[in-house]
Image (spheres, grey):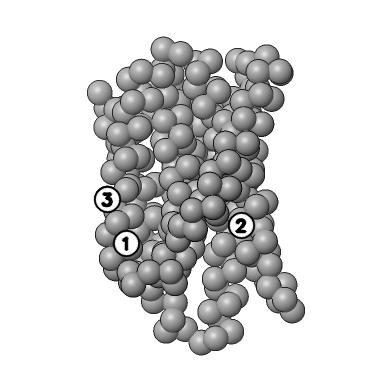
Amino acid sequence: MQELYLVIILTLMAGMAMPLGALLAGIEQLRPDWLKDEYRHGIIAFGGGALLSAVALVLVPEGIAPLSPWLAALCFVGGGAAFMALDILLDRIHTPAGQMAAMLSDYLPESLALGAAFAVGESSGLLLACLMTLQNLPEGFNACRELSAATHYRAPRVALIFAVIALLGPLFGVLGYAWLSAYPGVVAMVMLFAAGGICYSVFQDIAPQARLEKHWAPPMGAVLGFVLGMVGHQLTLG
């Protein structure tokens, strides 16, 4: 029961990084122009680095362990294809919530995997929760900017919406803990599916937005995001 409470707390902590990112996006207009650009692009790159570390250090290593190479590859490519299909759909219906949909596409399967990881006693659960928090902060920041630019919603209102959405994380975490723990193969498939989708998102959305002409600092955000995941991975290994 104590582990179940921990799953709820960690998934909620990761989810609440989304409204926090939205609030940061709201105060960004108070900053000088040079910091506005560097700060925004650096945060986007940081999120990309954190996402890549989640893929490289947690989702793929844990996902490929119990699966055959062909099934692992199928799940990974299937995740990328599903995220691509979602991207195409959002573009065709001209929705202003593309970044928010991408954010949820990461957050929910990762919450599911986190709950299952704690149920089977894997040490990667805590690291995955930390990486989810790191990635949701810049994703919430970026999604808020997108919604604010396309609608009349301001940052506090967007943050409130994201706070409600964050409650889905504990729900999926409990589902993973109570149900998927009995099916380690399914957990591995969910992890690889999420990894493939994240990999698609990083190179389709995040990396192109992080680049800034005549500025070289923002890509260091990706390095910092990844190295935090790397250090966390080493610490969990003892």
On the image, numbered disc 2 is attached to which residue? Answer: 206
Q: Amino acid at mark 2?
A: Ile
Secondary structure under tag 2 reads helix
Up-down relation of residue 182 to residue 212 (above or below)? above
In the rendered image, which quarter is residue 1 located in? top left
Q: Earlier in the sequence, mark 3 or mark 1?
A: 1
Up-down relation of residue 222 to residue 123 (above or below)? below
- How packed mark 1 is, by other alpha carbons closer than 10 Å (few <14, some 14-19, many 20 or more), is many
Q: Earlier in the sequence, mark 2 or mark 3?
A: 3
Task: State whether residue 68 appears in this view.
Answer: yes
Toward the front, the furthest residue is 92
Secondary structure under tag 1 reads helix
Give the percent coordinates (x, y) of residue 21. 41, 62
Residue at 39%, 54% (x, y): give it: 17
Residue at 64%, 64% (x, y): give it: 210
Q: Which quadrant of the rendered structure holds the C terminus? A: top right
Horizontal side of residue 54 vs 73, given as left or right: left
Q: Amino acid at mark 1?
A: Ala
Q: Amino acid at mark 3?
A: Val
Check if mark 2's residue and mark 3's residue have beta carbons within 8 Å: no
Give the percent coordinates (x, y) of residue 30. 42, 84
Horizontal side of residue 164 vs 80, given as left or right: left
> Could you tell me how far apart the alpha carbons at marks 3 and 1 are, in whole angstroms?
9 Å
Q: Nearer the viewer, residue 233 or 194?
A: 194
Label placed on residue 159: 1
In the rendered image, which quarter is residue 85 located in? top right
